[in-house]
């Protein structure tokens, strides 16, 4: 006589549950955020350094011009641009800000003056983009510009 046995067979799982998918996507997002963030930061730093190099080259060019011509070279700063009587010598890239380091409100913005003896009268300039910033200083006696 045949016996009647009830067998419970486990159904095989054909896919993943919603919870498993959400956990995997969350982990992938966290890991990619940690990996990509330094790369983006490095890219912003590189752009800022390139803009600073161009600014330093423009300032040092004016210092050399003052020495070779034997005349004072005056450079004005306004709206992120350095200008001379001859025209524009440097413009900060579109998303960058170029301004003098904060001075007392009573003090007006004075032009940068390069003298024939190699000295200079210049404020410290700040080139920034978002939360990144570089201070560019021009040596008072040497006329050499550098990142502070």
Image (cartoon, rainbow, N blue to C red):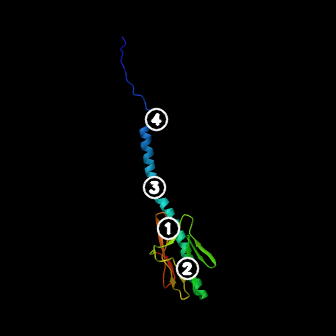
Q: In the rendered image, which residue does mark 1 sit on?
A: 128
Distance CA(mark 2)–CA(mark 4): 66 Å
Front tag of 2 and 3 = 2
- Name above or below for residue 32 compared with residue 57: above
Distance CA(mark 1)–CA(mark 3): 25 Å
Coordinates of residue 85 in the picture (x, y in percent): 62, 79
Of 64 and 107, which appears nearest the observer?
107
| SS type, badge 1 | strand
Distance CA(mark 2)–CA(mark 1): 20 Å
Distance CA(mark 2)–CA(mark 3): 39 Å
**Mark 2 surroundings: few (<14), some (14-19) or many (≥20) residues within 10 A:** some
**Mark 3 surroundings: few (<14), some (14-19) or many (≥20) residues within 10 A:** few
Which circle's residue, 4 or 3, is located before the other in the chain?
4
Quick check: marks 1 and 3 in contact, CB under 8 Å? Answer: no
Q: In the rendered image, which residue does mark 4 sit on?
A: 15
Q: In the rendered image, which residue does mark 3 sit on?
A: 35
Which circle's residue, 4 or 1, is located before the other in the chain?
4
Quadrant (top left, top right, bottom left, bottom right) of the N terminus: top left
Q: In the rendered image, which residue does mark 2 sit on?
A: 60
| SS type, badge 4 | loop
Coordinates of residue 115 in the picture (x, y in percent): 55, 86
Distance CA(mark 4)–CA(mark 1): 51 Å
Quick check: marks 4 and 3 in contact, CB under 8 Å? Answer: no
Of 38 and 117, which appears nearest the observer?
117
Which circle's residue, 2 or 4, is located before the other in the chain?
4
Q: Is residue 34 left or right of residue 62?
A: left
Quick check: marks 2 and 4 in contact, CB under 8 Å? Answer: no
Q: Who's the residue at 43% across and 42% down the image?
A: 22
Looking at the image, the residue that sits furthest to the front is 106
Front tag of 2 and 1 = 1
């Amino acid at each position: 006589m045949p016996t009647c046995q009830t067998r419970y067979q486990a159904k095989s799982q054909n896919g993943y549950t919603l919870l498993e998918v959400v956990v995997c996507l969350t982990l992938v997002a966290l890991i990619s955020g940690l990996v990509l963030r330094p790369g983006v930061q490095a890219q912003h730093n590189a752009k800022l350094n390139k803009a600073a190099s161009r600014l330093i080259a423009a300032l040092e060019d004016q210092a050399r011009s003052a020495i070779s011509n034997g005349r004072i070279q005056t450079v004005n700063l306004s709206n992120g641009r350095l200008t001379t009587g001859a025209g524009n010598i440097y413009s900060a890239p579109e998303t960058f800000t170029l301004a003098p380091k904060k001075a007392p409100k009573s003090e007006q913005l004075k032009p940068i003056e390069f003298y024939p003896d190699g000295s200079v009268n210049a404020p410290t300039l700040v080139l920034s983009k978002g939360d990144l910033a570089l201070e560019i200083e021009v040596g008072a006696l040497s006329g050499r510009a550098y990142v502070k």
